[in-house]
Image (cartoon, helix red, strand yellow):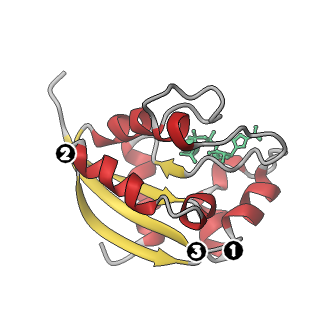
Amino acid sequence: MTAQTERSLVIVKPDGYRRGLTGEVLRRIEAKGYTLAALQVTEATREQLAEHYAEHEGKPFYEPLVEFMSSGPIVVAVIEGNDCIKGFRSLAGATNPTEAAPGSIRGDLGRDWGLKVQQNIVHGSDSTESAEREIGIWFPNL
Ligand code: RTP
Ligand code: MG
């Protein structure tokens, strides 16, 4: 299959922002060759998070996740590039930082989940449909 220029929604979660890792995450995105189409520091509303995490509603980690995502500023970005959805998820690494491969954002910088299961520094869209849906939530004018 040929590579496709696509967009993905990336979030530096409150743990990443708080720890001063925003620059490091953006550095890795740009070093990979993806471009930043939109970038904003914001605090997520309950409504935005409910929409963003609709697929997880009802799961045991849903409430703690929404709570955590409201715990401080986040950085929301739209990145662009060839196959950047899959590519960014590869940069991010496995969901659980303990299992994420060294070299990935979560593998290099993430901390043992312990009780704080939601804290894995970044979010990246998982499909073109999710990406377009999520971009609409955070950047309605794009
Ligand atoms: P993300 O959506 O943040 O890019 O991460 P992901 O695709 O790797 O993981 P996903 O399954 O979509 O889960 C969304 C976020 O929910 C938290 N989570 N906690 N077992 C748990 O306690 C659990 N599972 C997921 C994580 O913050 C995960 O990134
Ligand atoms: Mg996900």
Please give the name of the residue rendered at 24% of the width and 52% of the height, measured from the top-left corner.
80
User: How far apart are the two marked residues, 2 and 3, measured between alpha carbons?
Assistant: 26 Å
**Image quadrant where one finds the C terminus:** bottom left
In the picture shown, does residue 112 fall above or below 70? above
For the residue marked with disc 3, what is the amino acid?
A: Pro
Give the residue drawn at x 77%, y 65%: 67
The furthest residue to the top:
1
Q: Amino acid at mark 1?
A: Arg
Residue type at mark 2 is: Gly
Residue 88 horizontal/vertical position (percent): 37, 41
Q: Are marks 1 and 2 in contact (CB under 8 Å)?
A: no
Residue beneath the point at 40% across and 75% down: 40
Give whichever of discs 3 and 1 has the lower sequence position: 1
What percent of the width, then of the height, locates residue 137? 48, 68
Q: Position of residue 6 (x, y in %)?
A: 24, 47
Mark 2 within 8 Å of ligand 1, using the beta carbon: no
Tell me which label, 1 or 2, sits earlier in the chain: 2
Q: CA distance from mark 3 to mark 1?
A: 13 Å
> How packed is label 1: few (under 14 Cα within 10 Å), some, or many (20 or more)?
few
In which quadrant of the rendered view does residue 69 lie? bottom right
Which residue carries the number 2 mark?
Answer: 33
Residue 46 has which mark?
A: 1
Above or below, comparing residue 100 to residue 23 in the picture: above
User: Disc 3 marks which residue?
Assistant: 73
